[in-house]
Image (spheres, helix red, strand yellow):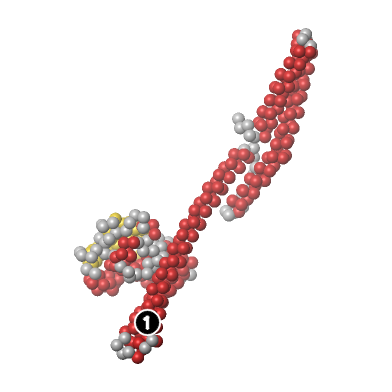
Amino acid sequence: MKFYEPRNLAFLNAAIITGVYVILFMLSVGIIFSHAFIHFYTFLALLISSAGLFLVAYFIFRYTLEKFIYSKIRLIYKSIHSVKVGKKGKNQYRPDNNLIDHVQAEVENWESEKQQEIEQLKRLEIYRRDFIGNVSHELKTPLFNIQGYVSTLLDGGLDDPSINKEYLKRTEKSVERLVKIIEDLDEISQLASGQIKLNITRFDLVTLTREVYELLEMKAHKHEIRITINDPEKPMLVEGDREKIRQVLTNILDNSIRYGKQEDGRTKITFFDMDENILTEITDNGIGIDTGDLPRVFERFYRTDRGRAATKKGKGLGLAIVKHIIEAHQQTINVRSTIGVGTTFGFTLKKA
């Protein structure tokens, strides 16, 4: 029995009052009229008055609880319920006898949801702060370089043939880096908001991979990285935006070359037929990624400590673009890695 329900609580209070009344009645009658206990009418009067008192107390307590207390609780419950269902659509409010249970459940659930929202906002604030800091850092480097070169030229370097052309070339490279950062950020924003429409076509993923390999072959050779493609027995035909997938392959392979093993570096590209999708995995034997860094490798401007130590090149936007392109195709990308062993990036595309 749940004593906090109106009828049960009213019954309990009425029973207590009636019990106290019976005890007091018997004591008073026994003291004042000692022979009255043996009289039938005495017990009849006690029974009638006790029953009457019980009924009156029961209805008074129940009315008071429902009118002045439970009506307020219902209002609270209705307010909480309305706020919650307002996010999900219309849902008619139906109070019942288990009001306290519902209010408790709603409050606990609401508290849990708000706590999750608070934690999410905290994470977003940390991400926003890191993002702004990283953007500032990435933009400051080329801007300071440009400022230094221009200042040198204005201070007389423009008339010095030994440095003027060289400093202008360096300024141009810094400007190109700024433009590339802005273009990448703009592309990420458009991909995330769905403003870029994909040009979906049917193409052979293996052929596209070979094209990307040919473009990066010289860079891989310079870094002593050997790239191998595990050719499947049949063409891997997929549906997707060919140029965007080219960008995905280029960014992942470039990342693999940049952070590859210094000597005897290897990168292997493998294709798997997954019934409805084609899985592409790019595996290297590079420096690897810490477990704590894995969830953040696709964030904008995020570079691991090992990555920063290995190279100062790169803007930290390549993998962020990759993730948005794959998700725009309604597909998934993942990464697994072991320090000192290597890293594997895998993404899926719909089979044509």
The picture quadrant where one finds residue 265 is: bottom left
Q: Position of residue 36 (x, y in %)?
A: 78, 11
Given the image, on which type of amino acid does mark 1 rest? Tyr
Residue 104 as seen in the image, left or right of residue 68: left
The picture quadrant where one finds residue 227 is: bottom left
Nearer to us in this view, 181 or 100: 181
Q: In the orientation shown, which residue stands out farthest toward the left? A: 264
Could you classify mark 1 by the number of other residues whose Cα lies within 10 Å: few (under 14), some (14-19), or many (20 or more)? Answer: many
Nearer to us in this view, 164 or 59: 164
* Residue at the image point whose x is 48% and y is 66% from the top: 193
Residue 33 as seen in the image, left or right of residue 80: right
Residue 217 shows in the view: no
- Please identify the quadrant where the N terminus is shown: top right
| Up-down relation of residue 150 to residue 327 (above or below) | below
Q: Position of residue 76 (x, y in %)?
A: 65, 46
| Up-down relation of residue 151 to residue 79 (above or below) | below
Residue 148 shows in the view: yes
* Residue at the image point whose x is 62% and y is 48% from the top: 80
| Up-down relation of residue 1 to residue 277 (above or below) | above
Q: Position of residue 6 (x, y in %)?
A: 67, 34
* Residue at the image point whose x is 34% and y is 54% from the top: 291
Q: Position of residue 29 (x, y in %)?
A: 77, 14
Badge 1 marks a residue whose secondary structure is helix
Residue 253 as seen in the image, left or right of residue 116: left
- Please identify the quadrant where the C terminus is shown: bottom left
Nearer to us in this view, 274 or 291: 291
* Residue at the image point whose x is 68% and y is 25% from the top: 16
Give the residue number, with chain letter if any, for mark 1: 149
